[in-house]
Image: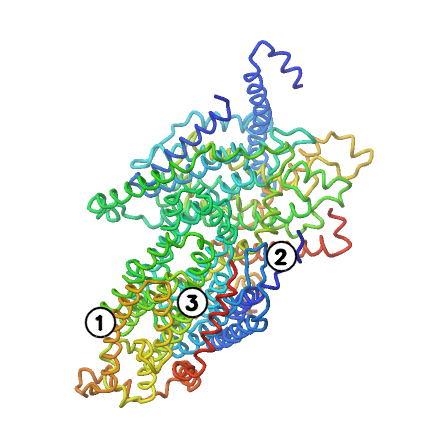
Amino acid sequence: MNFASLNAAAARAEIFLAVAACAILLLGVYGDQARRAARCYGLSLVALVIAALLNGLDFSAANGSAFNHMFIADPMAKLLKIAICVLSAAAFVYGRQYNRHRGIFESEYYVLGLFAVTGMLVMASANHLLTLYLGLELMSLCLYAMIAYYRDDRLATEAAMKYFVLGALASSMLLYGMSLLYGFTGSLQLSVISSVLTADAATAAQPQAAIALAVVFIVVALAFKLGVAPFHMWVPDVYHGAPTSTTAFLSAAPKIAAFAITMRLIVGGLNALPDIWQQMLILLALLSVAIGNIIAIAQRNLKRMLAYSTVAHMGFFLFGIASGNAPGYSAALFYVLIYALMGLGAFGVILMLARPEYEADQLADLKGLSKRNPWLAFLLLLLMLSMAGLPPTVGFFAKLAVIHALVQSGLLWVAVLAVLLAVIGAFYYLRVIKLVYFDQPPSADPATAAQTTTTITEGDIAVSPAAILLLSCNVLAIIALLPWIHYLIAICNEVIRRFAV
Amino acid sequence: MTFLQFAFYFFASVLVFAAAMVVTIRNPVKSALFLVLAFFSAACVWITLQAEFLAIVLVLVYVGAVMVLFLFVVMMLDINIAELRAGFTRYLPVGGVVAVLLVVEIVFVLARTFSPQQFANPPSHAADYSNTRELGELLYTTYVYPFEIAAFILLVAIIAAIALTMRARAPRKRIDPVRQVQTRREDRLRIVKMKSASRTAHRDQQDDAS
Amino acid sequence: MREYFFWLTAWLPHNLQVTMWVLTKIVAILAPLMLCVAYFTFAERKLIGYMQIRVGPNRVGPRGWLQPIADALKLMMKEIIIPSRANRFLFLTAPLLSLGPALAAWAVIPFSDGLVLADIDAGLLYILALTSMGVYGVLVAGWASNSKYAFLGAMRCAAQIVAYEIAMGFALVGVLMVAGSLNLRDIVLGQSGSMLHWYWLPLLPLLVVYFIAGVAETNRAPFDVAEGESEIVAGFHVEYSGMAFAVFFLAEYANMILIAALTVLMFFGGWLPPLEVAPFTWLPPLMWFGVKTSLVAFLFLWFRATFPRYRYDQIMRLGWKVLIPITLLWIVVLGMVKFYTPIGVWFA
C-alpha cells in the first residue's frame, strides 16, 4: 500500500477544513483580544466557502472512493456538503452580533464550529461504520461545547449537559448496534455489510430476529440524534437553552448531516432489510409529526415552539425514508434541504431581533412586529407560510413530494395521517403571523417599556446590513426558487439515482 | 488446566470482581482505585491473548495517565456519594426491570445465533511476530482516515475544555520567568556612596529625634 | 550457568525448575540493586557533604561506611504509626505500590548483551507503563494519610508527573524512531560503533528533555515539590515512619538508578565501550554499564546540591510549554531527517 492508493485527494474538502480550523485556532491566539475574534470569524467564513467550492467543482464527476472505501464521494455527499458549508457560514453571519453582545464572540467558538462542520462532512461521505461514528462524535462534541459556550447562562449550561448525557447514551446505543451488525456480517464497511445482508436474505442464512436487534439499536440511536419522538425530549431544552446563534447553527447543517447518516446507514447499509426498519421509521415519523405539531401549540417561547416544529419536520423527512423507494429518498433529501433553509431563516430572524440583555424569544415579543420592523415581519411571514406548507412556497412542494412518495409506495393511510397532522401544525405557524400582523405592539406601560419597547423600537442600527441582506436572500429563496422547483427536484432524483451503495 | 488457562481465569475473575466493586463501593476514591485494578487485570487478560502492545498501552494510557487525573479530580472534589444516590432506590425497580428485559431479549436472540464454534480460531503467529509493527502499519495505512478523525476529536475535547473553563481575568498579575531569571544585580540593588557620618553628627541626629 | 542450575535441581519437576530459575535471576538483579540503593544514599550524603564543605556521615564504621546499614536497622526497629482515621489498608499498601513498579521495571533492563531477565519486544513501552504507575503510591499515600500536608503533596505530585510523563514519552518516541525498535537490546545495539554513534548526539534535545523529565518523575530536587520539606513538611510521606517510610525511600532511589540506567541505555550506548579499541574493551560490558549509570546517577546528586527548588507554577510551565513543544518539534525534525535527507542513512 502506498500513499497514492489512499486517493486522499477525494477528501480534499475535509482535509482542507480541518487544516484550516487548526490554522485559525493558532491565529486566534495571537494579536489583541478584540481583533483576533473578528479575524477568526472572517477566516472561518472564507474556509467554509472554499470547502463548499472544493466540493462543487467536480460535482458531476463519477462516484469515487478513498481511504480503502472508507470515504465515498458520490453526488449526494457533494450536494449535502455544499449545503452544510453554506448554511453553516450563514449561521455564523447571523449570529455574529448576538455573540458579540453576549461575550461569546471568540475565536474558539468559530474553530469549534469549523470542526463541527468537518465532522458533518465526514458523515456525509462515510462508507464505513467507523468513520460514520467518528464523524458523528466530532460533530456532537463541538455542538455540546458550542451550546455551553454561553458560560454565564444557567439555561445554556443545563442544555449542554442534557444534550451531552443523552447524546452519549445515543452514541453508546449506536455503537452497540454497530457491534452487533459487525458480528453478523464480519465487516464494518457499509457496502460489504449491504452485500452480505442481501446474500443472507436470499438464502435465509441469518435469523431475522438477531439482525432486527441490531437494527433496533441503530434506529433508536438515530432517532435520538435526529430528535424524533419519542426520543425528542432533549430537543426543546437544547433549542431553548442554547444561545440563539448556536441554535441557528444547530437547526440547519446538523439536520443535513443527520439525513446523511440515516441514508448511509439505513438505505446504504441495511437496504436488504426494508421490512424490518420500515415499520419502525413509520411509527417514529407518525409519533413525531403528531407530538411535535400538537405540543408546539402550547408553547409560549418562540425557540421552544420552533424546536417542536423541528421534531415535526424531522418526522416528515423520515416519512420519505420510510417509504423505502427512490422517490421517497429523493423527497426526503429535498425536504431536509428546504427545512434547513427555513429553520436557519427562522432563527436568523430571532437573532436579528435580539439585543443585548434581550433575547426576543417569547411569542409575546413578536406582537405588532409588522409596525416596528416591517421587513423582518415580512420575512417571518414567508417562513411561517413555508413551514406550514402552504402553497405559494417551496415548503409546500417539499411536503407534497414526501406525501407523493408515501402514496406511491402504497402507504396511503400514512399519507392521510401525515396530511391531517400537518394541518394541525399549520395552526401555530399561522398564530405567529397573527401576532406579527394583527396584534398591537406591547403598550408603553412602564413595566414592559424598560425591557422591550426601548430596545426594540430603537430600530436595527445594531445589526449589520450584510447579515440582513444574507438573511433576506435566504428567506426570499423560499419564494424565489419556485420557478426552478422541478429542476431542483430533478437534481435530487439524479443524486439519489447515483447514490452509491 | 494449562497455566495459560489458569492465568486467564484468574485475571478474568479479578477483572469482574474489580468491575463490580467500581459500581457498588461507596467511596468514590476507592471506586476509582478499583477501576485501576480492573484496567490492570484487563491488560493482563490481553497479554494472555498475545496482544502485548495493546495491553501495555492500556496500562500506560489508562492506568498511568487517565486514571491519575481521574483520581486527582475525585480526591479534590470530595463527592458526597449519598447525595448522588438519593433517588437510587426509588428508580431501582424501574431500571432493574428494563435492564433485565434487555438482557433477556439480547440473550434470547443471541444465544440462538452466536456460538464460539461458528468462528474458527485465529491462526497463531510465528515467534518473531510483532503486533506493534502490525498495528502501526494498519493504523497509518488502512485506517489512517478514522485515526486522524479520532485525533481531531481529541483536539476538539482539548479546545472545548479550555474554552469553557479558562476565563481571562484582566488585569492579571503574572511573573515573566524570562525576565525574572535575567535580572541582574544592578536592577535590584543600588549601592549609594555616602560619607560615613561623624560621631558628632550622629549625636546631633539623636538629639533632634529626642 | 543455566545448565549448571538445571543440573543441580534435576530432581525437581521441570515447571518448578523454571520457576526457581526465574526467581534466582530476580534475586540476582534485586539483591545488588538494593545494595546499590543503600550505598547510593550514602554517596548522596557524602557528596553533598563535600559540596557543602563538610565531611558527611563518618561515625559508623570506618569513614562512615556502615552508615546505610545502621540506617536500615534503625528504620526497621521503629514503629509504624498509622494516623487516626487514616485508611489502614491503603495506608500500608501505598509504599508497596510505589516500590513495586520501581523494581518491576528492572525486568527488561539489559545489563549487557543477553544479560536480561525478560527480553521482550515492547520493552520501552513496558518501562514507560511501569514508571507511570509509580505515581499511585504517592497519590494513595497522600489520600490515605488523612492529612492536609500529605494530600497537598500527593496532588502536586500527580499533576507534575502527568505533565512530565508526556514529555518523557515523546522523548522516547524520538529514540524509537531512530532505533526502529522498542526492544532495549536492539536500541543499544543500534548505537554500536563509537561514542559518536550513541544517540546522545542526534537526539541531544531529547536527551536533555528526557533527563529533566526523569528528574521530575522521580520527584527529585529541583522538582521535589511533592516532598517540599520547607513548605509542606515532607509532603506525601509526612505521616509515614519506620519501615513504611523506608519503602518509599527505597522506591525513590531505585527509581533514580532506573532513570540513570535508562538514560545510559537509550542515549549513551548501554554496555558498549566508548571506542571499540584496546584499552576500552578491556573493561567488561557489565562494568561499562555500571560506570556510565553511576556517572548519570551522580547528576541527580549534583542537581540536588546545586539547584534551588522550582516554584510550582514554574514547574508546570516548564513541563507543558517548554519541554513538550521541544520534543514535538524534534520528532518532526527527526522524521524529516530520517526519511528525506542523505544523513538519514546514518540512523538506519
Residue sitting farthest toward the top: C11
Q: Pick whichever, A408 or B38, lies toward us.
A: A408
Q: Chain of mark 2?
A: A
Which residue is at a point 28% across and 66% down the rendered structure image? A289
Which residue position is annotated with label 3? A327
Task: Give the mark toward the camera: 2 or 3.
Answer: 3
Task: Give the Cα distance between marks 2 and 3.
Answer: 34 Å
Quarter occupied by the C terminus of chain B: bottom left
Secondary structure type for disc 1: helix
Which residue position is annotated with label 1? A297
The disc, 2 or 3, on the residue closer to the chain's N-terminal end is: 2
Q: Is residue A88 above or below residue B62?
A: below
The disc, 1 or 3, on the residue closer to the chain's N-terminal end is: 1
At which x and y percent is residue A420?
A: 25, 70
Residue C53 visible within the image? no
Secondary structure type for disc 2: helix
Amino acid on which the number 1 mark rests in the picture: Ile
Q: Residues within 10 Å of mark 1 (few under 14, many from 20)?
A: some
Q: Pick whichever, C289 or C25, lies toward us.
A: C25
Amino acid on which the number 2 mark rests in the picture: Leu
Q: Is residue C206 above or below residue A142?
A: above
Task: Give the Cα distance between marks 1 and 2.
Answer: 52 Å
The disc, 1 or 2, on the residue closer to the chain's N-terminal end is: 2
Q: Is residue A77 left or right of residue A176?
A: right
Amino acid on which the number 3 mark rests in the picture: Pro
Which residue position is annotated with label 2? A6
At which x and y percent is residue C19?
A: 55, 20
**Label placed on residue B184:** none
